[in-house]
């Protein structure tokens, strides 16, 4: 059976009804042809804020997502890549006028 990874930007640990709704809808639409595995962001990712609040800026969100996908595609992380990703995200936040701690 084909398995499809669905990555939500929400912290689904606190949104169990939403997660179940996604899974139920996918099962109804796909029948037995495929299974959708729903994943969410780890609890605490947004430090108590909603995903909408944190990700309201599409530019910052897509830049961060692109970098995360690039790193994940390597199946390993080198320290230099993580440092580069952190610096890139700091730059994005500074462009948005957010305070960035060292």
Image (tube, rainbow, N blue to C red):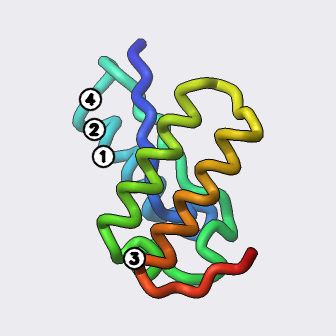
Residue tagged by mark 2?
Answer: 28
The percent position of residue 87, horizontal first and vertical second, equals 61, 59
Which secondary structure lies at badge 2?
Answer: helix
The tag earlier along the polypeptide, 3 or 1, is 1
Quadrant occupied by the N terminus: top left
Q: Are marks 2 and 4 in contact (CB under 8 Å)?
A: yes
Distance from label 1 to label 4 (Cα)? Answer: 9 Å
Distance from label 3 to label 1 (Cα)? Answer: 23 Å
- Residue 79 image-quadrant placement: top right
- Residue 36 image-quadrant placement: top left
The percent position of residue 4, horizontal first and vertical second, equals 40, 28
Distance from label 2 to label 1 (Cα)? Answer: 5 Å
Residue tagged by mark 1?
Answer: 25
At label 3, counting other C-alpha atoms closer than 10 Å, the crowd grade (few under 14, some 14-19, many 20 or more) is: few
The percent position of residue 64, horizontal first and vertical second, equals 47, 56
Q: Are marks 3 and 1 in contact (CB under 8 Å)?
A: no
Residue tagged by mark 4?
Answer: 30
Q: Select label 3 or label 2 by which is in front.
A: 3
Residue found 46% across the figure and 68% down from its top: 92
Residue tagged by mark 3?
Answer: 52
At label 2, counting other C-alpha atoms closer than 10 Å, the crowd grade (few under 14, some 14-19, many 20 or more) is: few
Q: Is residue 36 above or below residue 12?
A: above
The tag earlier along the polypeptide, 1 or 4, is 1
Q: Are marks 4 and 3 in contact (CB under 8 Å)?
A: no
Q: Is residue 49 left or right of residue 79?
A: left
Query: Which is nearer the eye, 65 or 37?
Result: 65
């Amino acid at each position: 059976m084909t398995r499809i990874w669905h990555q939500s930007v929400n912290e689904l640990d606190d949104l169990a009804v939403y997660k179940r709704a996604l899974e139920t809808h996918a099962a109804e639409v796909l029948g037995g042809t495929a299974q959708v595995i729903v994943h969410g962001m780890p609890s605490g990712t947004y430090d108590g804020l909603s995903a909408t609040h944190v990700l309201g800026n599409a530019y910052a969100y897509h830049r961060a997502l692109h970098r995360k996908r690039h790193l994940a595609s390597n199946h390993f992380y080198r320290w230099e890549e993580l440092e580069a990703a952190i610096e890139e995200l700091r730059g994005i936040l500074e462009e948005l006028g957010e305070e960035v701690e060292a």
